[in-house]
Amino acid sequence: MENCDLLITGATVLTQDSLGALGDGAVALRGDRIVAVGPSPRVAARFAPARRIDAAGRILLPGLVNTHNHTPLMIVRGMVEDLGFAPAYTPNIPQGHLLSEEEAYALARLGAYELLRMGSTTVVDYYRHPQACARALAESGLRAMVGGRIHDVDTAALANRQWRYDRAIGAASLDENLALVERWHGAADGRITCMLAPHAADTCSRDLLEEVARIARARHLPVHTHLHQSEAEVASVQARDGMRPLALFETLGLLGPELVAAHCIWMTEDEIARAGRAGIRVAHAPIGNAAHGAIAPILALRDAGATITLCTDTKSADMFETMRTALHVARIRGAGYAIGAPEMLRWATVNGAVALGMTDAMGSIAVGKKADLVLLDGRAPNLAPVIDGAGIVVHSATGANVDTVVIDGKMVLEAGRPLLFDGDAVVADAQRVASRLWQASGYAVIRPAA
């Protein structure tokens, strides 16, 4: 018999690969890789594991790929949803430029904890103090692509819908992103990689976006941004540059498969067609969009040729809720039953890997891929009955069903509890930071019992 580090048997395995769904499936891991997938009797007869998990009645998924998030923005959850469509454009709340490095770290730890607890194994994350974000994500055990928030607009003025540009702000934010790349690209045994993250077309001047495009080409770095997120963004860029944001990105050579663009809501039919032809990767944020009354033309973008992925965008880290909401809003927009659970699960796994250029490493449960796995607790009443697997996961599962998470072959969550850090301390630290900053912004803060 062959040795392996971990053998999971008896699970309903949704491989997202050519094997499809296995009713009594097993997965063997050695080091950071999957070395066998198949029926439990056959795989169990082949391997002598250092550790074995009897997963009878449980559902095993590839790790979920969450393609757009801002971990320190945990500070606005439960508040900004009733105040404005996005924190950067909402006055009188704790803004990113008010956070210290350590405050950003404390909040990023909370964000990382929730992502892990809800079944995301890979996340795209960017904000102010990106090294604090990278540190928090690395310590949590997550796989992450991290960027800095590049902009040259004065964010204090932006909250009041005033677009004032400052070269010094742009240079500082770009330098912050480049310092992140130097320190963190390939860190944590390769789990942390980096990107360039211009905030949006309206918060970056044309000159700054030109510089981002030049560096991205020279250093072969992916680019991540918000694109056509709001009507105000579109109107601002039109007034400033005489063209809409997509056209600006196209003109600068930023529109292509190396671009992951979040939201993509306010697009014309022609812009949808151009985005599709360019092969952009769309980070669809259905919950955040719906929260302010918007629905992205996501099926039209898919049909035009864009790769559709899913993201939680900080408001909630529950990718199961995100899959469900994406399906619902697509049907509200007219998709009918032409789209269903299997495609949603693909958007949350396989397509995320495609968007990040990591198809050889993740997105499905297959021999040779990274051992990034999520095991759902099959004892939960909302996970029964299981018929085809994908249906119950997309239409009924929640992040609370996540029991065990393995990333890079290492168990990082077991029985719903993190193994690499003290989750209770992370929550308490973030609460203290948030309470202090919201109180400084003039809000009465409920103080939980110690």
Image: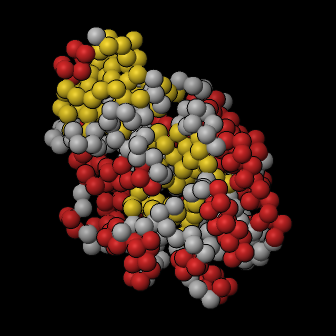
The answer to whether 116 is drawn above or below residue 227 in the figure is above
Q: Of residues 35 and 167, which is closer to you in this image?
A: 35
Q: Residue drawn at (65%, 75%), measured in percent from left and top?
A: 202
> Residue 76: horizontal and vertical position, in percent?
62, 54
Residue most toward the left?
A: 387
The N terminus appears in which quarter of the rendering? Answer: top left
Question: Is residue 337 rendered to the left or right of residue 109?
Answer: left
Q: Of residues 24 and 395, which is closer to you in this image?
A: 24
> Residue 426: horizontal and vertical position, in percent?
63, 33
Colouring scheme applied when the structure was drawn: secondary structure
Q: Residue drawn at (62%, 62%), measured in percent from left and top?
A: 217
Q: Residue drawn at (41%, 57%), measured in percent from left and top?
A: 309
> Residue 39: horizontal and vertical position, in percent?
19, 26
The C terminus appears in which quarter of the rendering? Answer: top right
The answer to whether 310 is drawn above or below residue 17 in the figure is below
- Quarter holding residue 53: top left
- Quarter holding residue 267: bottom left
Q: Residue drawn at (39%, 36%), measured in percent from left and top?
A: 369
Mark count:
0
The answer to whether 26 is drawn above or below residue 356 in the figure is above
Question: Is residue 256 rendered to the left or right of residue 381?
Answer: right
Residue most toward the right?
A: 168
Q: Of residues 53 and 442, which is closer to you in this image?
A: 53
